[in-house]
Image (tube, rainbow, N blue to C red):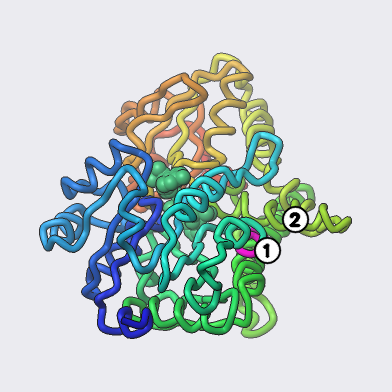
Amino acid sequence: MDLKKKIQSKKAEIGIVGLGYVGLPLAMEFVRAGFMVHGIDLNQERVRCINQGVSHVLDVPSDVLRAAVDSGRFKSYPSYSIVSDTDCVIICVPTPLRHTKDPDMSHVVSATENIAKRLHKNMLVVLQSTTYPGTTNEVLIPEFKSDHLEIGRDLFVAFSPERVDPGNPVYNTKNTPKIVGGVTPRCTEMAQTLYEQALDTVIPVSSTGAAEMVKLLENTFRAVNIGLVNEIAIICEKLGVSVWEVIQAAATKPFGFMPFYPGPGLGGHCIPIDPLYLSWRLKALNYNARFIEMASDVNTHMPEYCVDRIHRLMNKHKKCVNGARILVLGVAYKKDISDVRESPALDIIRLLQVDGALVDYTDPYVGELDLEGKKMQSVAIDAQGVAKYDLVTVVTDHSSFDYPMIQASASLIFDTRNAYKMAAQNVYKL
Ligand SMILES: NC(=O)c1ccc[n+]([C@@H]2O[C@H](COP(=O)([O-])OP(=O)(O)OC[C@H]3O[C@@H](n4cnc5c(N)ncnc54)[C@H](O)[C@@H]3O)[C@@H](O)[C@H]2O)c1
């Protein structure tokens, strides 16, 4: 049967490679749409848990996962052999940075090589991992070239950027519009047909390069605007005005202004990383992506700036950081999720420890932290406990924090998130 018809009749079998924050919710959407879905992930323990219906992704409750597994339409594997039996494969593996801040493409390369060995006629492969423009054509296509499979006729290859925002109560995998760009128009059509079976809106673009660039524009836009507002926060402190008041007032303008908010730095697997994939690519073309480099510089120095403010604040109150007991409120990189990847809280804890502070943290979503091999456990907090600290710093504004209690009990608070909407004597804001 023709692949398009197979997809439209939901007879196509789908492989999702990489069952993390992106792959697992996507797998659930295709199961919900009526497809047979095969998960592939090299993390054996993760695969074991998933097959038992135990989810590690907050946006996929375990009962939803269990129902998918029990339906017989979702099974996961710690190897690639099943790829030979699939019609469509979607790659959702990580794309982190190396220590040198260069792209680490090893997961994409390994997934590509493993899929390449199992390609067959009438197959669609879509890359969803965020990456630099050119990846699909330069990394996937050379591996997929063969004498018996012509791309656009026998084999279809496309890129589709992932836009999921973990923890977002309104927008999820299903209702966030999906961009697709294929190597050929037929490839685009095939990828569009696939996603249209499970997601609300699919928007085709003319090429894989355009689709790759869409994601990088979106995330560079955020990184640059956050960098700008972080610099405005530093400027406002020097001028003795409240950055929060200034943003709130500026946001009353009904056109031409979109509020962004300062914070302790960028976290997660997207905003701190993706723009650097773009600037890295541009370096090879002898172009220095100045906005990206500058925003990255401002954003990566925010933890240092916050710790500097903590030093000055304690000094003002005749205390010093060395030997002080400091409580960090929230270590996830954003509100109401458990992801600590690239979280600025980790840098803040490290910097405070280097300066001699005795640091604890509390985070309802993160029971344990691994700071380069040194483990820390989240502490439970009550009024008496909070009062023992010389300073409390809000790094992540989780909804469940009891701010009135914390404010009433803490001697000194440094708030990097404007979590306290009310002014109080002991609260100092970024
Ligand atoms: N997390 C987000 O909010 C988000 C949003 C948009 C885009 N993205 C992008 O989506 C991609 C995936 O991100 P994620 O957050 O889901 O990552 P993740 O770390 O949560 O999950 C990736 C999974 O891939 C598995 N894996 C790694 N290498 C593999 C390989 N060679 N073969 C098979 N499995 C492999 C890992 O074991 C892991 O389970 C990245 O490129 C990321 O930039 C993420």
Q: Position of residue 77 (x, y in %)?
A: 28, 47
Q: Residue at x 68, y 53 (%)?
A: 277
> Which residue is depicted at the point 82% across and 53% down?
284
Q: Is residue 340 left or right of residue 405?
A: right
Q: Is residue 31 above or below residue 81?
A: below
Estimate the spatial distance between the alpha carbons at disc 1 and disc 2, rounded to whole Å. Answer: 8 Å
**Residue 37 placement: quadrant:** bottom left
| Closest to the observer, 145 or 410 | 145
Residue depicted at x 67% and y 42%: 302
* Marks 1 and 2 in Cβ contact (< 8 Å): yes
Q: Amino acid at mark 1?
A: Pro
Which of marks 2 and 1 precedes in the sequence? 1
Residue annotated with mark 1: 133
Q: Is residue 192 visible?
A: yes
Q: Residue 423: image x %, image y %?
A: 52, 52
Image quadrant containing the N terminus: bottom left
Q: Give the residues drawn in magenta, as a range.
A: 132-137
Residue that numbered label 2 is attached to: 281
Q: Secondary structure at mark 1?
A: loop
Ligand 1 is within 8 Å of the C-beta of the residue at disc 1: no
Residue 40 place in picture, x, y as percent: 34, 50
Q: Horizontal placement of 45 versus 184: left or right?
A: left
Under mark 2, the amino acid is: Arg
Q: Is residue 162 magenta?
A: no
* Residue extending furthest toward the left: 70
